[in-house]
Image: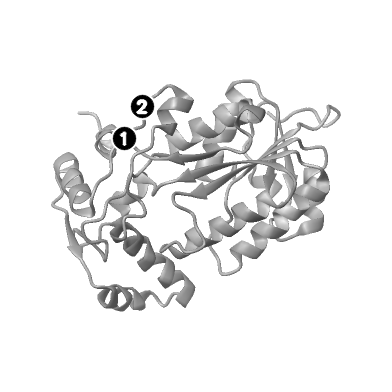
Amino acid sequence: MSADATSPRPTLAVTGSTGWLGGLVAKDLAGRGVAQRLLVRDASRAPELQGSVAAQCSYRDADAARAALEGVETLFMVSAAENEDRLAEHRAFVDAAAAAGVGHVVYVSFFGAAPDATFTLARDHAATEQHLRDSGMAWTFLRDNLYLEFMDHMVGEDGVVRGPAGDGRAAVVAHDDIARVAVTVLLDPAAHAGATYALTGPEALTFAEMAQVITEVTGREVRYHDETVEEAYASRAVYGAPDWQVDAWVSTYTAVAAGELDGVSGDVERLTGRRPTSLREYLEAQRPSR
């Protein structure tokens, strides 16, 4: 149930509520009785949550975004859908937020974001972070590792995970854990101003180890094949994706090979009081009860 149209517009705005991560955050906040403004591209798709009002805008439409953000004090900004112009969209939205007088932006970034990161999209996250630093608004960055929910979706129909990750490790993290951290920050943003949190699972695994976990829990025989970079580009050429997208797919693995997604952080447990979920625990929870 949405907030009454005559009541003051909520000063907390949440993007991405029609998606996985933003939806978890919005639902959790609503369950706590927190009023929120849900910024969505299509108001008809906004979730019906107690105390929420929908505001329609897109990241690239600066005028609509500024209008939707008027009166907002704290903004939860999920990164835009992957596309060739995502960084430009992020910058436009950040500028609109600053122009609207937003005080604090909590931005969902990526683990190891840096201008020279191996993973191409992590460079865009680093540039977005810098734009936020330069905006004059307060900020908090949530740098997520790879999402553990996607690991079993990386398995091909033949039961093989392919990519040039070598023996590199990734500390994959669950959406639920990221959402809990986000809610913690949004409930008291001033306490987290200027903080950058590395959000990881409880262990860093190689792709071979992840394949083994999937095999043991699901009973499906899964293995990892360490492609060369050349093989990786060739095996993904069949999808006909644009160059920037293929670069992103391949560099996900090469970033792991380079050690840029390794390292377990204690930030999830420190901020939420709960140990983050492991890949094995997640997969076991997905098994149908017998």
Residue denoted by label 2: 275
- Above or below: residue 220 compared with residue 189: below
Measuring from the top left, give residue 248's x and y in whole percent: 43, 66
CB-based contact (under 8 Å), mark 1 and mark 2: yes
- 118 or 75, which is in the foreground? 118
Q: Identify the secondary structure beneath mark 1.
A: loop
Residue type beneath disc 2: Arg
Residue that appears at 77% across and 41% down:
102
Count of marks overlaid on the render: 2
Measuring from the top left, give residue 277's x and y in whole percent: 33, 33
| Image quadrant where residue 72 sits | top right
| Residue 202, numbered circle | 1
Residue that appears at 25% across and 46% down:
205
Alpha-carbon distance for marks 1 and 2? 7 Å
Q: Is residue 41 visible?
A: no
- Above or below: residue 169 compared with residue 254: above
**Residue 280 vs residue 244: left or right?**
left
Q: Identify the secondary structure beneath mark 2.
A: loop
Measuring from the top left, give residue 242's x and y in whole percent: 47, 76
